Image: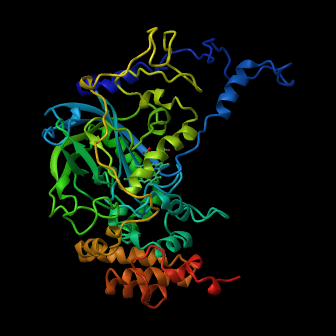
Amino acid sequence: MNKNQQDNKKISQLQEHTTDNQDRKLTTNQGLKINNNQDSLKTDERGSTLLEDFILREKITHFDHERIPERIVHARGSGAHGVFKLNKSLAKYTKAKFLNEVGKETPVFVRFSTVAGSAGSTDLARDVRGFAVKFYTEEGNYDLVGNNIPVFFIQDAMKFPDLVHAVKPEPDNAIPQAASAHDTFWDFISLMPESMHMIMWAMSDRAIPRSYRMMEGFGVHSFKFINSEGAVHFVKFHFKPKLGVHSVAWSEAQKISGTDPDFHRRDLWESIENGAFPEWDFGVQIIPEENEHDFDFDLLDPTKLVPEELVPVQLVGTLTLNRNPDNFFAETEQIAFHPGHLVPGIDFTNDPLLQGRLFSYTDTQLSRLGSPNFHEIPINRSINTVHNNQRDGHMRQQIAKGKVSYEPNSIGGGCPFQAMMKEGGFTSNNERVDGNKVRARSNSFVDHYSQAKMFFNSQSEPEKTHLQNALVFELSKVTFPEIRERVVGQLNFINKDLASYVAKRVGVEVKKLDMPNQSIPADANPANLQSEEREP
Ligand code: HEM
């Protein structure tokens, strides 16, 4: 361990749970030494195996249960330990302690991932990349669960299961495994104009990074910073790689994928092993609460970014990855991120995609990790000790002493009590809430093309060619001409040359779509037809 690693509180906490098998004798799970790990117990050398062979039974039983479900999305990933160092205080905006004191170092674990593929899929897929950071702060774990693209496909959590069902292999034959190259994905996209901005990013070179070390990270949603006086600012989070942003071309990606599907995993591992520690500048875009409505888009809309020309990114910290995990399963696989893991000074906004995520992560982790006690898995433990009255459940590790596990109580008996306000703790932003219950979307979310155009126009000529050819490649895999036509119709709202370039090569005409800004064009959804027009 180098000095940095010794000072890392999370690493020293993990050491307590780490076994070193070097020069040790083999034992059963009960600690009994094993003298023969080659042969089962038999009635004779050629005879039947005995049921009483508890050593064989234990070994095989454990093996039978080795696999856990992979993540429902972001199943393919790689992670590393590191440190976050604050270079400029944000105390003016947030009371989060890890963002207050210049020079403060906070241990982190970062997991990068693709979204659509399974755990064994190639690193080189054309896909979004996850960029999830767990900060082990002194006030508890803070998770920034972001992506390498600053916007998302959909505006409301209600559509997430549909999006994922459309992008995953088709349910009847589980084909195709390659992300996005199929009928269902493009069918869904063609009917979701709000996805067009993200589609421009996903078809660009950004979706095939050269290395995890060379991609940006974004919190995507607007979050809130709250300072010690209670003042509120909106904030967008950024990670900018010190090595710059680099991608591979599609033709390169296909070749690399064929020869080394672990390309990004290997690159991350080897660079850390060789001491070439990956580094990112951490930046924030800060918008005072009173300026919330100053933009021609809605800050709560996750399909929009805040242009850096309007609100510059202030670089305030450095993220460095400096240590590979000791065990992929125990650390990278069992880590559980959650956008709802907050510390005082950071809060949510009403972004309707973010709000749905707040439910989803713990819920999925209950089945993925199999117990409500997954916070006790070493990689998930806070560096603060945990004291509460939650008890029992599958695989409980903590042995909480005392007679009483409820509050209020007059007995004491080892029960932890709630903290006084002056002792710290989380208070939600004291925002006024008033309104009618509606299942609806704001009109301020309706412009789906301006930022898609902005992104397309920002591309250099070679980048535009790559993006156009990506669309041609993807759409040429779509078997339904009407889906190709609808996608081209959407592209036509972004750029006419782009639409006709693609249309010509995928064998369709550029036709005008009726209701570009409506999430589901009326003529494309049978449910929207008048009852007499509906098929019986
Ligand atoms: C992983 C749900 C949107 C970034 C996951 C997982 C679920 C999920 C269930 C698996 C978690 C696990 O098994 O531990 C959702 C829902 C969304 C949504 C319901 C929208 C309503 C987003 C967005 C981002 C994002 C907008 C980026 C800002 C990630 C990342 C992971 C992930 C990075 C992988 C975390 C890891 O490495 O373990 N998401 N997600 N998700 N999600 Fe989301």
* Picture quadrant where residue 203 is located: bottom left
Between 490 and 479, the residue placed more toward the observer is 490
In this rendering, the answer to whether 298 lies above or below 56 is below
Residue lying at 55% horizontally and 70% vertically, measured from the top left: 184
Number of numbered discs visible in the structure rendering: 0
Q: Position of residue 343 (x, y in %)?
A: 30, 35
* Picture quadrant where residue 244 is located: bottom left
Q: Position of residue 26 (x, y in %)?
A: 59, 17
Image quarter of the N terminus:
top left
Residue lying at 55% horizontally and 45% vertically, measured from the top left: 70
Image quarter of the C terminus:
bottom right
Q: Position of residue 15 (x, y in %)?
A: 39, 21
In this rendering, the answer to whether 123 lies above or below 459 is above
Between 312 and 254, the residue placed more toward the observer is 312
Task: Give the colouring mode of the picture.
Answer: rainbow
Q: Position of residue 115 (x, y in %)?
A: 46, 55
Residue 409 falls left or right of residue 2: right
Does residue 497 appear anywhere in the picture?
yes
Residue 334 falls left or right of residue 444: right
